[in-house]
Image: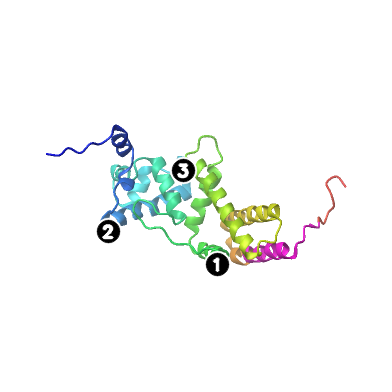
């Protein structure tokens, strides 16, 4: 009988990889269970943060055992990264990714996402809490958020260049992308604290139009109403 040779590296890799990543075509029921866990983890991590959010509580909300959660995601850290990927619409644990538009249509997609976020405060809270926590030393999601921010910045740079016909100064384009990310993330915190006082979609659209308009006009002057520091 022909023998199948499996390298030690492959064996080690499989042993160290959660079942959610090893199985290529999970059954529908399995996917539903995993999505239940991810939604529960979004809720728990959003309310209590990563360090204080207990796997037992996540398991209870998802209607399964602590061991069941570990079976699907391997560890608490593995679940955290899966939650972040799920929140961002990436393919994770066999759950298909949510397609995003490209080019100029991506800016409209951003506004649509901000509008959608006003209907799901738990998701917004989870992102705000976990992204803030990730700056602390040794946080398991630090590299994820660093990579996510840089990836979004680079995507915005490409979209902004396309939207401005590639005529804008590249440092201005880079700074505009960073400013947009800062506005969206900062507004989420303001909205969570006082949702009646912050119209996130309106503010993001206003800032987006202003920044893109400034790039198109080629203006680099910024009026500082109170003058330079120390004046």
C-alpha separation, residue under disc 1 versus residue under disc 2: 32 Å
C-alpha separation, residue under disc 2 versus residue under disc 3: 28 Å
Q: Earlier in the sequence, mark 2 or mark 3?
A: 2
Disc 1 residue crowd, few under 14, some 14–19, many 20+, Cα 10 Å: few
Q: Main secondary structure of the magenta part?
A: helix
Q: Are marks 2 and 3 in contact (CB under 8 Å)?
A: no
Mark 2 highlights which residue? 28
Asked whether residue 211 appears in the rendered view, the answer is yes
Disc 3 residue crowd, few under 14, some 14–19, many 20+, Cα 10 Å: many
106 part of magenta stretch = no
Q: Are marks 3 and 1 in contact (CB under 8 Å)?
A: no
78 vs 197, nearest the viewer: 78
Asked whether residue 187 appears in the rendered view, the answer is no
Helix, strand or loop for disc 1: helix
Q: Residue furthest top?
A: 8
Say left or right for 213 vs 44.
Answer: right
Q: Which mark is residue 48?
A: none
Locate residue 214, reporting x and y percent. Answer: 73, 63
Say left or right for 54 vs 211.
Answer: left
Locate residue 105, reporting x and y percent. Answer: 55, 67
130 vs 44, nearest the viewer: 130
Mark 1 highlights which residue? 105
C-alpha separation, residue under disc 3 versus residue under disc 1: 34 Å
Q: Earlier in the sequence, mark 3 or mark 1?
A: 3
Q: Residue at x 37, y 43 (%)?
A: 55
Against 203, residue 22 (above or below) is above
How many numbered callouts? 3
The span shown in magenta is 204-223
Mark 3 highlights which residue? 50
Helix, strand or loop for disc 3: helix
């Amino acid at each position: 009988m022909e023998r199948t040779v499996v390298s030690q590296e492959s064996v080690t890799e499989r042993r160290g990889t959660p079942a959610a990543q090893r199985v290529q075509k999970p059954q529908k029921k399995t996917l539903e269970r995993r999505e239940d866990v991810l939604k529960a983890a979004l809720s728990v991590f959003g309310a209590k943060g990563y360090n204080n959010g207990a796997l037992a509580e996540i398991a209870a909300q998802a209607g399964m055992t602590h061991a069941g959660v570990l079976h699907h995601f391997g560890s608490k850290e593995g679940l955290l990264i899966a939650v972040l990927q799920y929140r961002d619409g990436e393919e994770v644990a066999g759950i298909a990714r949510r397609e995003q538009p490209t080019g100029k249509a991506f800016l409209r997609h951003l506004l649509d996402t901000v509008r959608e976020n006003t209907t799901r405060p738990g998701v917004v809270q989870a992102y705000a809490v976990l992204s803030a926590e990730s700056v602390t030393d040794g946080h398991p999601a630090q590299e994820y958020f660093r990579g996510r921010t840089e990836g979004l910045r680079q995507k915005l740079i490409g979209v902004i260049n396309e939207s401005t016909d590639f005529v804008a100064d590249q440092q201005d384009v880079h700074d505009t992308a960073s400013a947009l990310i800062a506005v969206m993330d900062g507004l989420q915190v303001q909205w969570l604290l006082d949702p009646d006082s912050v119209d996130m979609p309106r503010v993001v659209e206003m800032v987006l139009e202003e920044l893109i308009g400034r790039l198109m006009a080629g203006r680099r002057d910024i009026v500082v109403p109170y003058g330079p520091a120390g004046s």
